[in-house]
Amino acid sequence: MQTEKEKSLEGKLYKATDYELYTERQNTKELIFMFNSLPPADVDKRNEIIRKLFSKTGEKFIIEPPFHCDYGSNISIGNNFYSNFNLTILDCAKTEIGDNVLIGPNVGIYPAGHPIDHELRILEYEFAFPVHIGNNVWIGGSVVINPGITIGDYSVIGSGSVVTKDIPANVVAAGNPCRVIREITEKDKIYYFRNCRV
């Protein structure tokens, strides 16, 4: 017989009120409380907590507090990762983030969800689908990423977007719901070299 944790990681309906899952979340809350309460200069201590929490980290990463997650153990981040203030990841399913990813403030990554049918919600059922964010992605401030989403390499998600469908690689996408606006081209690089100081 499957545990509720196994069901959650397989995308099946499960009950988050299960004692094993509740205990894991409580343990994570303790570590997150410590992380968010440390003085700004204690970068090494904060990173040590993240390494304990996450299933994988790159060598170099910065997560600005406050940060929140459900378990931490379902999160992996690549090298050279940066997230601004108030990142929330409801990692009831795998949340995999690649190398060189930048995340703006107040971003929510939500693998977790509740059934539309009210009777299932009353019975305390939930579900969770994995989220995959590729390499070299930039996610603007106040973006919401819903369950089961994949964002391709090199793409940029405009601020305030609500991502409800997969986003391919190498595009600018924005809006509510988020949609592809255009491909990223060599002209984008030329623009910044002409108009910004390096």
Image (tube, rainbow, N blue to C red):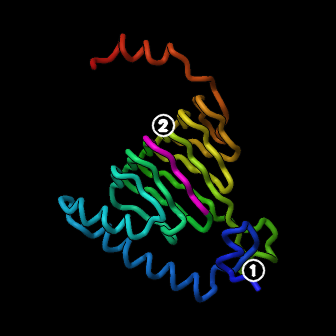
In the rendered structure, which amino acid carries the disc numbered 1? Ile
Q: Earlier in the sequence, mark 1 or mark 2?
A: 1
Q: Main secondary structure of the magenta part?
A: loop
Which of label 1 and label 2 is nearer to you?
2
Packing grade of label 1 (10 A; few <14, some 14-19, many >=20) is: few
Residue 64: percent from the left, percent from the top?
A: 33, 55
- Tell me how far mark 1 sits from mark 2, CA to CA: 41 Å
Residue under label 2: 136
Mark 2 Cα-neighbour bin, 10 Å: few <14, some 14–19, many ≥20: many
Which residue corresponds to the image point at 62% horizontal and 60% vertical from the top-left? 111
Which residues make up the magenta segment? 94-101
Q: Which of 125 and 71 lies nearest the eye of the viewer?
A: 71
For label 2, the SS is loop
The residue singled out by tag 1 in the image is 122
- The residue lying furthest to the bottom in this view is 19
Name which residue type carries label 2: Asn
The relative height of residue 79 versus residue 175 in the rendered view (above or below) is below
Determine the residue positioned at 40% across, 62% down: 67
Up-down: is 102 above or below 58?
Answer: above
- Residue 58: mark in rendering: none
**Residue 49 in the image: above or below residue 163:** below
Image position, residue 179 (x, y; %): 67, 35
